[in-house]
Image: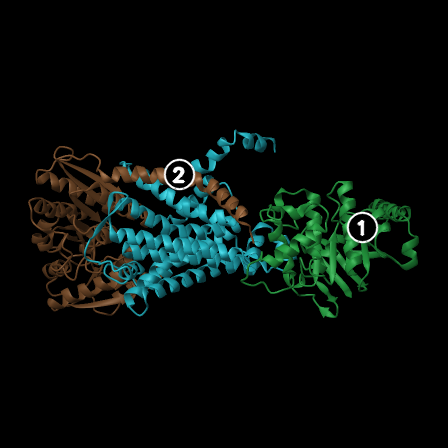
Amino acid sequence: MLELKCLHKTFNPGTPDEVKALSGVNLTIADGSFTVILGTNGSGKSTLLNAVAGTFIVDSGSITLNGKDITFMPEHGRAAYIGRVFQNPFSGTAPDMTIAENLAIASMRGKKRRFLSALSRGAMREFYERVKALNMGLEERLDNNIGSLSGGQRQALTLLMACWNRPDLLLLDEHTAALDPKTAAKVLELTKNYIEKDRLTAFMVTHSMQQAVNLGERIIMVYKGKIIHDFSGAEKKSLKAKDLYELFEDIKRRELIDPATSEILKANYV
Amino acid sequence: MNLLLGTFTIGFILSLLAAGVLISFRIFNFADITAEGSLALGASTAAVLITSGAFGPAAALLISALAGAAAGVLTGVLHTKFKINALLAGILVMTALYSVNLHVMGKSNIALMNEETVFTSFNRLLSISESANKTVLILGFPASVKEAAAAALAFILASSGGALLYWFLGTELGAAMRATGNCPQMAAALGVNTELMIIAGLSIANAFAALSGALLASYQGFADVQMGIGMLVWGLASVIIGETLVRDKSVGFAITSAIMGSIFFRLLVAIALRFGMNPNDMKLMTALFVLAALVLPRIYKGGGRFAGAAVK
Amino acid sequence: MYSPAEYSKKIIYSLSKLAPALALIFCASAVLLLFSAAPVNRSQIAKFAIVCYSDTPISEDGVRGIKDGLKKHGYEENRNYKARVYSAHSDSAALNGIIDAVISEEFDLIFTISTPALQAALKKIKKTPIIFSSTGDPVGAGAGESFTRHAANVTGICSLSDFSGMINLVGEIAPAAQKIGTIFCPSEINSVLYKQRLEKAALEKGIKLEAVAASTAGEVADAAESLCAGRGVEIICQIADNLSAASFTAIIKASAAARIPVFGFVGSDAKHGAALSYAKDYYQGGIDSANLAARILKGESPAGMPFEYISKTTLIINKKAALSGGLKIPESVCRRADSIIE
């Protein structure tokens, strides 16, 4: 179970570039649930994910994962419990290392790395089997550098790597956004399979309404660093992309009106 | 033949430096200038330990390498924990090491003329007399037995150093270290302590540089506080020339090519000196060799990469 | 893990990758080997190598001195001898390469300038005569046990300051002087050595040396103040080390305020406000090495030739600085001066 309590984060405080990225986020995610975060650009949805992943330490609030307070745990420490896939297919794999070497690093997530060969015979056999299960023919190219693969192939491998040792929490940060529709569908399919097979607790950021409606059992909408909508259960099931779209339009309208209203207010009262 | 053997010996000794530079330059993508300081540190430490007589020559080498590793840790900590630019951190530690080396030796230069070094130990092991200057024929050319033994020892040490590095980079920890340099975001996401890896990597790199310095001092018979100056360029040149000659950047080839690059570079320098190049032009020639190594492969590829780069 | 076929495939791949490098190394080695077997320019005239470690005015003065000195003995460059000047540009690896090249060229004589150049040559060259110069402490550098018992193929010119000469000057100029002073740097081994030598030379004439330590440039001014205040120091004889050379003006300032004259061991000291400088002449050091070379070329063995000191020390007098320090330089000393700053 992931519990976020009153998370606050301000970037560049006290400068003209000050951004209040998170302002009081409270959220509890049950074990084995698949939650989708929706939001406009700059709404704070990726920031929320990064706060959980430990890319930065929050200004205040607490993050608890399975009863363990990880608020101040460094990124690499949390990685023992958390698997991640990034939006950029280049971020999740080391391009100048072979597929097998990348898998070897992933297979040691959360374990103590030792002075033992990373590519032992047993490990290679396991790499072969699990890459074969991707059905992409990559199992014959384990000795190739990952840099020679396509974005979709890299993203599929990143997903495999993130799920290699069953993570307590899987963080997906718009991981299909940079792919062409066909590849995106394939990677999404894989994602669903992994989550269902291992009963993973997943937390996915997207800006595609359709994805949000099709996937998961809970939708959270984030706006200006706050959670403004939270749909789950039957409510979530009855939601359609159109409904979400309207909610977004509403947000956009508010965004447009707000500055204008403030101008009017200023003109009349100041 | 002795000229050739001497060239090979220095080439093998400095290939350990090249291996160190390979770690910082190719794994972490920056040229760690600490190597210049740790090379002299290795030489100073070895010289002091050898002349003190309290340690055997092999132990002296080992302790020198540890001293270099400590210097690397310092640069790594400055860079990762205090967020100082990597080049600047290297320059700071290198500068500080100059004074440290003076203090280690207590003077600017220590002679190792008749001391027991790894080279004399190796001669004793092979029952080669120090005083008698015996010669043998190698490929029909007369060669001093001592020079041949020195070259053989340097070869053994360089290849064991290379093999050790190859083994390490293939371990779970070594793979994590390479990933740290190649894709830090991925490494961190998979639970690799990237700061620790950078510190460890720089310490290994500088241990190699220090070992190289300790061997150089043992071989040439003295340690001098100025020994490290300009050495980073030799190391970089070896790595770059090696890469140009061997077009495969996987770990094993990268290490082998750095050693070969070091040898080839020393040979070029020896030939240039032999044929009466004005010594004042030596640094210029070094720069030109490296430039050639960087540019030639691009021209060789038919200008395709130039065109590609221009379009970008 | 791999079948034999896969193994051989791997080996063939490796060889194909390494082949160009191996071929180049082989060719370069062959070139070097073939040309090192037969020395280039085998000719009847003598060949000398001059090996410098760094590029400093001291090295340049030394090289000039060697060539001019050889001329005095009838050796004219390119007429009856050839000389190659090598400089390692302060690069140890290059220095070794130079020594290897020197060996394969089969020179008749090797001059080394500076300590590292001597050491690199000592390690590898056991037969060809080596004549060193610009070396402060040849015994410490490993050239032998003493100035008379040393490596058989080595002799040379030691560039240590002339301490007793300096003390004699003190005696001539200020016969009543009882106490001289200097600043020294405990972390510089040469500084400590020079301080001890100066002390010994002074004691022989019944003069006491007051030495104050300074470890950093910032401490020199304070040390100089301390030296000038209440210690009864009549003359400062500043030894030549890196620290005092760098902060010499601080010493001059303190001594001028206390009206204590300064005698310096560095040639430029007189120009910078010392009453006089009594410094080793590195050009003369070159000439002295050429004299040793001439003896060796006539058939004498270096083994029987003790190390010598640079025969000439240049005396420069700054009359104004001496006067403001309350000193009148006797005419007899002025007459010996190489130059006088009025």
- Circle 2 or circle 1, nearest the eye: 2
Secondary structure beneath disc 2? helix
Comparing A113 with A11, the one in front is A113
In this rendering, does residue B228 appear at all? no
- Checking the image for residue A130, the label placed there is none
- Residue drawn at x 91%, y 54% is A237
In this picture, residue C76 sits left or right of residue A223:
left
Image x and y of residue A23, in percent: 77, 59
Q: Colour of chain C?
A: brown
- Checking the image for residue A39, the label placed there is 1
- Residue drawn at x 73%, y 47% is A135
In this rendering, does residue A124 appear at all? yes
Q: Which residue is the site of mark 2? A: C23
Comparing B198 with A270, the one in front is B198
Q: Quadrant of residue B210?
A: bottom left
In this picture, residue B67 sits left or right of residue A264:
left
Image x and y of residue B13, in percent: 36, 52
Q: Tell me the crowding category of disc 2: few under 14, some 14 to 19, or many 20 or more residues within 10 angstroms, Cα based.
A: few
In the rendered view, would you say A173 is above or below C17?
A: below
Residue type marked 2: Ala
Chain letter for green, please. A
In the rendered view, would you say C131 is above or below B56?
A: above
Which chain is disc 1 placed on? Answer: A
